[in-house]
Amino acid sequence: MRWTVLSGVAAWLAAAGLLVACADGTGPQNERRVAMAPISFNEIAGWADDKHAEALVSFRRSCPKLTSGPDTKIATDGGFKTITPAEWKKICDSAAVVKGNDDRAARTFFEDNFRPLVVQVPGRFTGYFEPDMRGSKAPSRLFTVPVYRRPTDLTDKPYYTRAEIEQGVLKGKGLEIAYVQDPVALFEVQVRGSVRIQLVEGGSMNLGFDGSNNRPYTTIGNVLIEMGVFQTKEQATWPAIRDWLKRNPAQARDVMRKNERYIFFRDTRTQGAVGAEGVQLTPQRSMAIDTAFTPYGTPIWIDTARPVARKPGATEPYRRLVIAQDAGAAIQGPARGDIFFGNGAQAADWAGRMNSSGRAIVLIPNKG
């Protein structure tokens, strides 16, 4: 994503100004020392009760990337540690022999191949989901808003702004991958980084992040606060922001264009969302992280709270093992996470209201 594509391609905090779940992360920009402390698996609340086989399914999806990519660096209690593809292969080979539904064996795998370190800074966890949209492969009076694939002349330099692209600078270049009806919904999809489009021609396509225009990201939640629409960030939930944008379409266009960043997509040809790592995301087992500290494929235990379905303001303990498989430009810090909740109404509700403190326990690969 998650920019994850997506921040990205993210939940309401992306729109409110606190995260982007669909930004591409490419690795440590610097090696800042991270305060981390060893802990035993027996000391982790909820560890023995988790469904570790679910996390193992998600981890296995990262293995082809881990074993064929470059060395990775991960923050530990002793500074950054390098993990080679060969070292990941030993771990992945061990994962491959665990039976799919065997939670006990999966738990033993993680305990044998990793050591847990508590990140000694407060954690913050949000959520995002894969929305569904109606669309068409061809423009019509109903479907007028183009969804663009990556331009061939896109480099790492600033490209056209959101306003210029929406005004048609790319029109007629054969970049339209689909057309949708709602510009607000497309903006939301660009924040989240992936979408499943139900085609009027029949069937569907899954689109995932394939680059940005390299323009600055401006959070429209903050823009609306400055305009006096909301008084606080707590009021600027994504449902509230969406509602205002839809009720004020003329102003909405200008507000959304305050965010110059524009996201391009590709047909992932999968049955689910794909994160910045390039692997299919697993609902409630994949998380977007800050790759400056934590590489893709890293298991992370999260101890936080999740909104209770259909009970505004209520939360419940949320403890589980997730895998780092996405990134976000505004997801910064070693204990910052954005949880992928999947698709559907329940996932949307969780993602829209998730904003919880907690702690992160990173599982560091054993070497040798």
Image: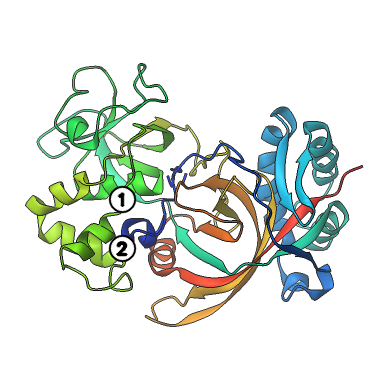
**Image quadrant containing the C terminus:** top right
The secondary element bearing badge 2 is classed as helix
Q: Amino acid type of disc 1?
A: Glu
Seen at 24% across and 33% down, the residue is 161
- Earlier-in-chain disc, 2 versus 1: 1
Amino acid type at circle 2 is: Trp
Front one among 329 and 35:
35
Which dot marks residue 238?
Answer: 2
Say which residue label 1 marks.
Answer: 188
- Quarter-of-image position of residue 217: top left
| Residue 81: % across, % down | 77, 44
In the displayed structure, does residue 138 sit left or right of residue 190?
left
Q: Position of residue 365 (x, y in %)?
A: 80, 49
Write down the quadrant of residue 155 in the picture: top left
x then y, percent, for residue 176: 27, 26
Relative to 305, is 236 on the left or the right? left
Q: Residues within 10 Å of mark 2 (few under 14, many from 20)?
A: many
Kindly identify which numbered label has been placed on residue 127.
Answer: none
**Mark 2 → mark 1, Cα distance in angstroms:** 9 Å
**Marks 2 and 1 close (CB-CB < 8 Å):** yes
Q: Is residue 126 above or below residue 203?
A: below
